[in-house]
Image (tube, rainbow, N blue to C red):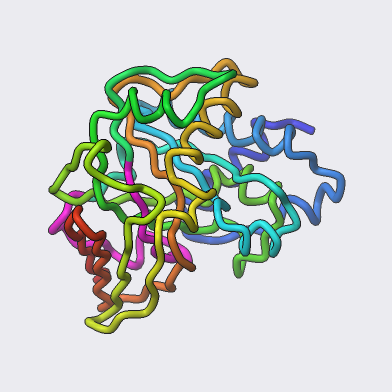
Amino acid sequence: MNYSEEAKKLLESEASKIPIGPLTEKYPNLSIEDAYQIQLAGIDMKLSQGRKIIGKKIGLTSRGMQKLLGVNEPDYGHLLDDMLILEGDTLSRNDLIAPKVEGELAFVLKETLKGPGITIADVYRATYGILPSFEIVDSRVKDWKIKLADTISDNASSARLVLGSKMASIKDLDLKLIGMMFEKNGEMVSSGVGAEVWGNPAAAVAWLANKLSVFDIALEKGEIILAGAFTAAEKAEAGDIFTVSFYGLGSVSVKFI
């Protein structure tokens, strides 16, 4: 298999907004290791085009989503500078294929974290602050007909992120118990607590630091780490307005046009 060729097809799909078929249909035995190599090949292509890595994201942190895809651990993807949407800016629905919105906590690192052996305590020590955030996921695979290897190859279905304007110290928050309320067009659609995210969002960040050590990749000082969704993702269409609020941390909103 040519990792770069498969990565190129995914990037072409992202640019054209024309989805492609699942890689796992073309390669029924596509391994998780192969999928990450495809993802990394795609990231290298974007970096060569002038993009910059601003962080990483963790996906599949909930037990329900893991069960759905038949896995027992999260996955990860890279966040690039062209994915960042400033709070208050609108997002064009036509820029994406089939977007969904998730409410998450964003960790901003003041120290580099590199596994193996990273603990929750290390994450607390290395975190400058926590922000409310949205992750907008999108699949370059038609109709979201994905298996784990498909979404990993596709940079964990990453598309955009929106950060709130209020940052809190991690020591002032109980990450396991912090509550989240998720609204769509003024109506609450879901709510959850931090324990839904791998037991503790900081545990998800520790997992990521240790997982990336296999590829000799670190969570770098200054990076933004999206720790995973509290609740199920919501589909987004033009005209939709989403707001997510975290107890003690404030809220963030995004509008699709």
- Classify residue 194 by image quadrant: bottom left
Front-lying residue, 92 or 174 = 174
Is residue 255 shown above or below 212? below
Residue 49 appearing in the image = yes
**Which image quarter is the C terminus in?**
bottom left
Front-lying residue, 156 or 6 = 156
Magenta-colored span: 86-106
Residue 44 appearing in the image = no
Residue at 19 percent across and 51 percent down: it is: 164
Front-lying residue, 86 or 6 = 86
Is residue 238 shown above or below 192? below
Residue at 73 percent across and 39 percent down: it is: 32
Q: Name the spot of residue 37 as percent of width and height, x first.
A: 66, 30
Q: Name the spot of residue 232 as percent of width and height, x first.
A: 48, 68
The magenta stretch spans residue 105: yes
Q: Name the spot of residue 83 as percent of width and height, x first.
A: 33, 45
- Classify residue 169 by image quadrant: top left
**Which image quarter is the N terminus in?**
top right
Is residue 224 shown above or below 63? above
The magenta stretch spans residue 38: no
Is residue 117 shown above or below 60? above
Residue at 43 percent across and 45 percent down: it is: 201
Residue at 52 percent across and 22 percent down: it is: 118
Residue at the outermost right position? 29
Left-right relation of 245 to 225: left
What is the number of callouts on the image? 0
Q: Name the spot of residue 206 as percent of width and height, x first.
A: 50, 31
Left-right relation of 158 to 72: left
- Classify residue 253 by image quadrant: bottom left
